[in-house]
Amino acid sequence: MLSRFCLAVCILVLTLIQTSVAKTDDTADVRERTRLEKVWNGAYVRADADALEELCAHDLVVTMTDMVVLNKQSSIAILRSGKVKFQRYETSDLGIHVYDHDAVVTGRLQRTRSVQGREVNDEWRFTKVYIQRGGKWLVVAWHASTVAIKQ
């Protein structure tokens, strides 16, 4: 009787652990995050601020190397202003971890942009946090930092 009880508790604990870890093997979830990453990247190249508006949560926080922390309004305003234009905005080396109502995407970002007529190339590592609200996946946090210089 005691061994059946212990077995039941072990099964319950394992079930609870499995529901709290990332569902990296769920291909539908991974495909959806990959699709959203393509929408995000394309929006920058096309200067489609409306597409980014749709992807971002109202309480978005953007943290990047050598910049002030931005919110949704200020980060999208940069794109709307036309002061920065992206010729390239590509991600690779994606790591996608989906949880119940959250997802974390990490990877490498390479971009080329024009700022006041000057071309700038960036190579960053990034972390993006998605949450699910109202049946939609929204970016709530995005952090990018410069790739370390190789020695």
Image (cartoon, helix red, strand yellow):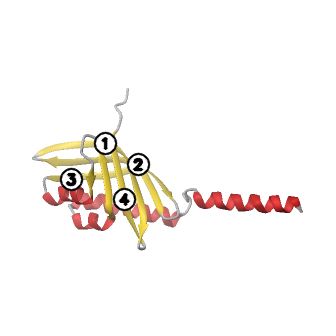
Q: CA–CA distance between discs 2 and 1? A: 11 Å
Q: Earlier in the sequence, mark 4 or mark 1?
A: 1
Q: Amino acid at mark 3?
A: Phe
Q: Dot 3, how many residues are within 10 Å of its Cα: few (below 14), some (14-19), or many (20+)?
A: many
Q: Which residue is mark 4?
A: 140
Crowdedness near tag 1: few (<14), some (14–19) or many (≥20) residues, C-alpha within 10 Å: some
Q: Quadrant of the C terminus?
A: top left
Q: Residue at x 36, y 55 (%)?
A: 141
Between circles 2 and 4, the one closer to the viewer is: 4
Q: CA distance from mark 3 to mark 2?
A: 19 Å
Counting from the top left corner in percent of width and height, residue 13 is at: 70, 58
What is the secondary structure assignment of the residue under circle 2? strand
Q: CA distance from mark 3 to mark 1?
A: 14 Å
Quick check: 143 above or below 132? above
Question: Where residue 123 is drawn, which disc sits there?
Answer: 1
Q: Which mark is residue 107?
A: 2
Q: From mark 4 to mark 3, how far is it between C-alphas?
A: 22 Å
State which tag comes first along the sequence, 4 or 3.
3
- Residue 86: which disc? 3
- Give the amino acid type for the residue marked by disc 2 in the picture: Gly
Cα–Cα span, label 2 and label 4: 17 Å
In front of the other: 57 or 123: 57
Q: Secondary structure at mark 3?
A: strand
Mark 4 vs mark 1, CA separation in Å = 22 Å
Q: Residue at x 31, y 48 (%)?
A: 63
